[in-house]
Amino acid sequence: MKKIQMMLLMMLFVLPFAVSPSIAGAEAAPRTISVEGESSFYVTPDQASVEIGIETTGTTAADASRKNAAVMTDIQNALYSLGLTQKDIKTASYDFYPVYDKDNSQHITGYKAENTVVVTTNDINSVGSIIDTAVKNGASNVNSVKFSLKDVQKYKDSALKAAVIDAKQKSKAIAGELGKSIVNVVSASESNIYVENRAAGVSFKAMNADMAAPTPISAKDLQVSARVSVTFEIN
């Protein structure tokens, strides 16, 4: 009997110590509010890129290549006269292949050379002049015009900061309505960030080199947006 009583006394003594850590852990768990902060704004682009292509043919490979080089040299020199430099004009692709007879796929009738360059400028108002100059000096195609931002990271940072501010405002509103206040940040993560790179939606094929009016190209503002997920601790 005494042995049973001793065992019961020991259990009563040990039980509080066995249970208390879990209770303490539950009491220590922070009360939290989780929100998503968002931001979105528009920025005027400060950079443009124009993809220009030329096609030349010749009876021999050397002839097609020579003609292509001559036309591209004329285009580049004309673009230099607009204030562009060599670093502003980069080769995007160069293709060279034989041209076969339509009625005899084994017979080569000549050769074709295709050269594409991307012209980048920080003066978005000069895009129309770049297109007209390239076409008048032998460009066969203007494949695309894209508007972008030079310092993309600066706008990403601004969007993220604005999203965090939005998250803080939301959490304070929720906490205040619950009679609580924000005391700490438990976690934060970037959900999404987006910087628009807009194409002008233009395509020119075999344009007339004697165009009377300049090509009108206008740039639309670019959207920058961000979303963050933040968990706040409340009292």
Image (cartoon, helix red, strand yellow):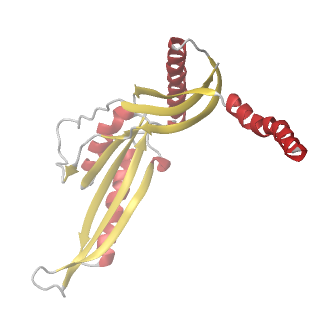
In the rendered view, does 64 fall on the left or right side of 81? Answer: left
In the rendered view, does 169 fall on the left or right side of 79? Answer: right
Residue 172 at what x, y percent from top left? 54, 16
Q: Quadrant of residue 112?
A: bottom left
Q: Nearer the viewer, residue 196 or 135?
A: 196
Q: Residue furthest front?
A: 1
Q: Residue furthest left?
A: 103
> Which of the image's four quarters has the N terminus?
top right
Res 24 seen here: yes
Q: Quadrant of residue 218?
A: top left
Q: Nearer the viewer, residue 88 or 105?
A: 105
Q: Nearer the viewer, residue 15 or 94?
A: 15
The image shows residue 97, relative to residue 34, as above or below, that is below
> Which of the image's four quarters has the C terminus?
top right
In the rendered view, does 228 fall on the left or right side of 197? Answer: right
Q: Residue at x 43, y 32 (%)?
A: 225
Residue 16 at what x, y percent from top left? 79, 35
Res 80 seen here: no
Q: Quadrant of residue 56?
A: bottom left
Q: Residue at x 50, y 15 (%)?
A: 173
The image shows residue 31, relative to residue 92, as above or below, that is above
Q: Residue at x 55, y 21 (%)?
A: 168
Q: Nearer the viewer, residue 59 or 48?
A: 48
In the rendered view, does 174 fall on the left or right side of 61? Answer: right
Residue 150 at what x, y percent from top left? 49, 37
Q: Residue at x 12, y 79 (%)?
A: 102
